[in-house]
Image (tube, grey):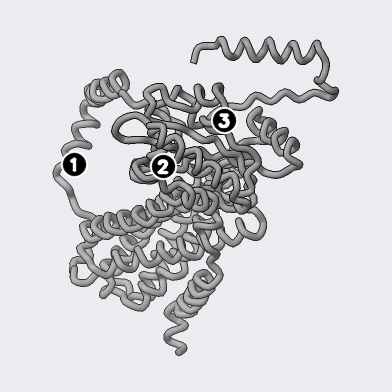
Amino acid sequence: MQVFIKKHGLAALVWLALIITALVAMPNVSRLVRDKGQVTLPSSVQSEVAQTIDRKSVNNRGVRSLIVVFNKQHGQLTTKDNQRIAQSIRQIKKDANLDILSMTSASDNAATKKQLSAKDGTTQLAMISLSDSAKVHRQAQQLRQHLHISGLRTYVTGSALLNDDFSTTTQAGLKKTEIIAAVFIFIVLILVFRSLLVPIISLLTVAIAYLVSSSLVMNLAQQVDFPISNFTQIFMVVVLFGIGTDYNILLYNRFKEELANGLSTDEATKVARKHAGRTIGYSGISVFIGFAVLALAKFSFYQSAVGVAVGVIVLLAVLLTLNPFFMALLGQTMFWPSRNLATHGTNRIWRWLSRSAMAHTITTVILMLLAITPLLLFSQQKLNFNSADELPNTIESKAGYNLIQKHYPAGMSGPSTLYIEADKSLNNQRDLGTIDDLTNYLKAEPV
């Protein structure tokens, strides 16, 4: 037992306990991200001020808007189809479990028919405002129970449901990111060290850091509203596995070099942790500061990256305490099946490139500019802030959204509401006339 403790076994036991604690204490991440991970804007932004006014108008109850899409794939909607749609809408209005605040459909009157019926006669919409007292996916599921109409395609969509599906899709993408990152890192480490054990140990240490820090961040989010978003875990995976692999390569290379110099396993471990560990510590602290200052940002999306700072601190602790355990325990066996402890080799390609670049600096810079310029001048990429475009078309909310985009003017899938608030009553001839003038002005604006 004394030998085990001497070879950094205490650190291994501590991290084993922390792993178990992290797994047991890990909250439901998907639910937590849905509840607290939505990107929000500062309260001073006009859209947030408008939402505050909206909540006041319904006695401080949160309002959620959903859209029901009725579509006939082949041909126009018939009179019988319209009757079935009207019957479905009546069933929705009668459903007390939905807690509907208001509902507007094409069958209400001539004005709504003109607005909510597509010009090609294939599609109708129903705009529903509900209380946000229930989960959005649960409300959507309740709506779908009333939407089984023979011969028609029916969809439930809206910004709230699209955001919820985006969160679900992001969580699924996170799992793929973890697998892809692990596979590529494993391949890179095999190529670097010609070893099977080093990639496993490296991935294990970084995975432990990610698990413990992820559990810590999610528990902080649950208990003290630590900032998170749909992308927090993706940020942590990319950064921790990226810098963690780099730091491990630096540490293992120094350990390998000291073994090649004739030091014993214990001495090589101490030297590697002392010298390479110092470099790793300085670099890790720089990364920590970079992500920690994002806590000062006003936009919640950037604030949510602060979780990476927590992950970096945990990563440094893991690499500088658990790695020495494996190095002291395995020694040269860690690099099996490779027996070559030489750490510095000469690569002819990189040697030629570096020599050429140093000998012909101006020419190298000109060639780089010539290579980059076409990418800057002819790039077709455009900024897109619509998260709905990131969803697969197979998701119901995205399919409904696509139909609205196809058959209706821009903005129909996310209508804007203009709020007018005053510190006095507007129920007088002058103010009502002003509101009418504003309404007519907006109507005259081109779509």
Q: Nearer the viewer, residue 240 or 445?
A: 445
Sequence-wise, the earlier of marks 2 and 1 is: 2
The answer to whether residue 243 shows anywhere in this view is: no
Real-space Cα distance between discs 2 and 3?
19 Å
Q: Is residue 60 left or right of residue 410?
A: right
Q: Residue 144, position in %: x, y?
A: 47, 49
The answer to whether residue 59 shows anywhere in this view is: yes
Q: Amino acid at mark 1?
A: Arg
Say above or below: 35 vs 377. Answer: below
**Residue named by callout 1:** 351
Q: Is residue 134 left or right of residue 84?
A: right
Cβ atoms at labels 2 and 3 below 8 Å apart: no
Q: Residue 131, position in %: x, y?
A: 64, 45
Q: Residue 296, position in %: x, y?
A: 63, 40
Sequence-wise, the earlier of marks 2 and 3 is: 3
**Quarter of the image where the N terminus is located:** bottom left
**Residue named by callout 2:** 154
Mark in front: 2 vs 3: 3
Q: Amino acid at mark 2?
A: Thr
Q: Residue at x 84, y 24 (%)?
A: 423
Q: Which mark is residue 108?
A: 3
Q: Residue at x 40, y 50 (%)?
A: 238
Q: Is residue 175 left or right of residue 311?
A: left
Q: Residue at x 28, y 20 (%)?
A: 378
